[in-house]
Amino acid sequence: MISLTGLRKVYPGRGGQQVVALDGIDLDVPRGGVHGIVGESGAGKSTLIRCLTALEQPTSGTVAIDGVALSGLGERELRRQRRRIGMVFQHVNLLDGRTAAQNVAYPLRVAGASRGERAERVRELLDLVGLAGRGDAYPSQLSGGQKQRVGIARALAAEPAVLLCDEPTSALDSDTTRQILGLIRDVRDRLGLTVLIITHEMGVVREVCDSVTLLDRGRVAQSGSIAEVAGDHGSRLARALVSLPPEPAAAGRVTLEVSFAGEVPTGRVLAAVAAVEDVDVSSGTIETLAGRRVGRLRVVVPSATAADAAARLRAVGVHVEEVA
Ligand SMILES: Nc1ncnc2c1ncn2[C@@H]1O[C@H](COP(=O)(O)OP(=O)(O)OP(=O)(O)O)[C@@H](O)[C@H]1O
Ligand SMILES: [Mg+2]
């Protein structure tokens, strides 16, 4: 499991001004969990990953993997602990002059595995990622998704306990993205890995994550299981997970966003909406996320009666917010 406690990273900035990249992060990802990290550019996502791989020394706080704190380890121990972490990147960076099998074998060679051990393990790994029989192909002969599969096999070669994925699907089309996310879940299921995925796509979080953290300027703005954050009406993650297209209301009218979860029967919500005078529904979705039904509707009402409409809707137990 991954455990961050009070993690803080301050970079010395230009002209003596310090940059607080991480400002006291507490985060626990249980063994076997797939956890997403989202946040705007500069929020601290990459810094967090670099602290996890010990490429970066935290200013204070601790990073522990399976209960072993990274700080205070000697050089040898640190190398061993690093091998317990596999990394998958947006750009796979395979060695072009080597075959898929040789790329996967590379970390095994570094770790000192014998030729026989390597051959067998590489075959297993290529099999695991759905590339059985493609070991002799060179990167130039593989599609983007296949290259990412090789990258995942390579990351798994040293039998890591943790897989860190930094934007693993950002360079892929949507079908391939789905396949690669399916593969990540599959290897998690089979190998019991703990997975951390950095992404800017909420679709990735919905598809593969059990839980998610929103970073904002180096702090945890929101964190929880998908069911928890989706049900936290009006929260930033709930909105991002189930988003609706913005559509400005006409003059004299305002848009109310109605959010609800499975506790309120859908029929009751729709009946309450229908009972609002001169109402229009501009968009909406009702879906099941992590086994929990969540819904969101944008209803357009006359400005003059908006407050009254919002109060009537709230009375059935939904969350109502005026949106621009
Ligand atoms: N080596 C460094 N020296 C100084 N400041 C840094 C360094 N690395 C990152 N920062 C600063 O720390 C903050 C967090 O950066 P980080 O790269 O972790 O963000 P990020 O969430 O990964 O962003 P992006 O989505 O753009 O990749 C930013 O303000 C950045 O400018
Ligand atoms: Mg980054």
Image: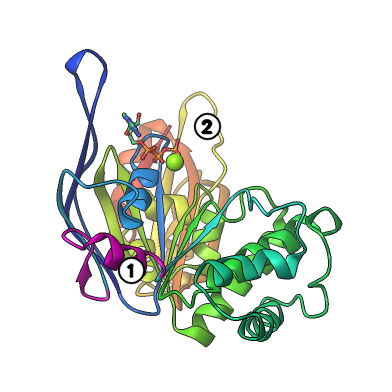
Residue type, mark 1 in image: Gln
User: Considering depth in this image, is 279 or 234 the residue closer to the camera?
Assistant: 234
Mark earlier in primary sequence (2, 1) = 1
Q: Is residue 312 magenta?
A: no
Q: Nearer the viewer, mark 2 or mark 1?
A: 1
Residue at image position (18%, 17%) is 16
Assign a secondary structure to mark 2. loop
**Which of the 4 quarters of the picture holds residue 41?**
top left
Residue at image position (16%, 60%) is 72
Q: Is residue 82 magenta?
A: yes
For the magenta stretch, what is the residue range?
66-83
| Label 2 neighbour load within 10 Å: few <14, some 14-19, many 20+ | some
- Image height of 34 relative to 132, above or below: above
- Image height of 260 relative to 184, above or below: above
For residue 259, side relative to residue 250 (left or right):
left
Q: Are marks 2 and 1 in contact (CB under 8 Å)?
A: no
Q: Which quadrant is the C terminus positioned in?
A: top left
Q: Disc 1, ligand 1: is the CB inside 8 Å?
A: no
Pointer 1: what residue?
A: 81
Pointer 2: what residue?
A: 249
Q: Tell which residue pokes out farthest to the top in this image.
A: 15
The percent coordinates of residue 165 (x first, y second) are 49, 59
Assign a secondary structure to mark 1. helix
**Which of the 4 quarters of the picture holds residue 29?**
bottom left
For residue 167, side relative to residue 14 (left or right):
right
User: Considering depth in this image, is 204 or 116 the residue closer to the camera?
Assistant: 116
The percent coordinates of residue 6 (x first, y second) are 14, 53
3D distance between C-alphas at marks 2 and 1: 56 Å
Residue at image position (21%, 75%) is 67
Q: How is the image coloured?
A: rainbow
